[in-house]
Amino acid sequence: MDLLLYWIGLTAVAVNALTGVLDAGRKRMDLVGVIMVGSATALGGGTVRDVLLDRTVFWISDPTYLVVALATTAAVFFAVRGLRLPPRLFLIPDAIGLALFTIVGTQIALEWQAPWLAASLLGVITGVVGGVLRDVLCNEVPLVFVRGELYASAAWAGALAFIGLQALGMSAVAAAWTGMAAIVAARLLAMAFRITLPTYSERE
């Protein structure tokens, strides 16, 4: 599981960096701005998780994560700059990055002896904070705070499924793949069919 967790983490960093570049590109940022947005998107959620767990920040203890974030950001910038891309294109890799980081964050929290409920929420934090930073740096309301399709709730459901399946005896690897698939499916179905949570409203 540890090796799988490591490679999922690296993939999550690359995918989130990609979403950062695509979103920053819509704002016509230069290379420095894109690198800042891409790196914050790729590393922000895991950084907050590690601070909360009083754990050495993952990209400081293993600079490979930082290298992957910077390399992906630069490569995508030069590959797609000048192209006209659909404005919502970044939402698909964003769903994948959300799933990868949520499961990684949940498992790391469990390994650091966090209670199951706290571990699931730390997984959600790992999955969504990078996107929050991306949207704030791009001067947009973060997706997680916008009334719209399932986002953090999809991540939380996947994290709880991951924990629950392990409690029922499923291997950690199988539970991880199932949890990630559930998050991606929930997010994509929510976008396709406009599935939302109930909202608070006041009567006039």
Image: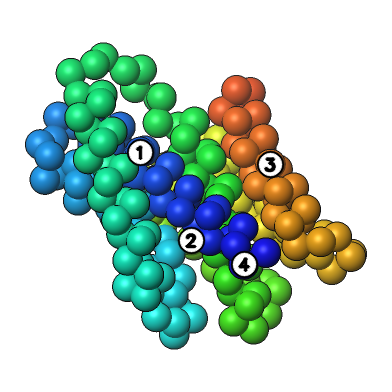
Q: Residue tagged by mark 4?
A: 2
**Which amino acid does the dot numbered 3 rest on?**
Ala
Residue at mark 4 to residue at mark 2: CA–CA distance: 17 Å
| Element on which disc 1 rests | helix
Left or right, 130 with respect to 82, comes to right
Q: Residue tagged by mark 3?
A: 181
Q: Residue tagged by mark 2?
A: 126
Circle 1 crowding by C-alpha within 10 Å: few under 14, some 14–19, many from 20 = many
Marked residue nearer the N-terminal end (4 or 1) = 4
**Observer able to see residue 139:** no
Q: Residue at 27% of width from left, 46% of height from top?
A: 71
Residue at mark 2 to residue at mark 3: CA–CA distance: 17 Å
Q: Residue tagged by mark 1?
A: 18
Residue 125, given in percent of the width and then of the height, sits at 49, 62
**Which amino acid does the dot numbered 1 rest on?**
Leu
Marked residue nearer the N-terminal end (4 or 3) = 4
In the rendered view, tell whether residue 110 sits above or below residue 153. below
User: Given the current orientation, which residue lies at the most extreme top position?
Assistant: 84
Q: Residue at 89% of width from left, 64% of height from top?
A: 168
Which of the 4 image quadrants contains residue 113? bottom right
Q: Nearer the viewer, residue 39 or 95?
A: 39
Residue 196, given in percent of the width and then of the height, sits at 61, 36
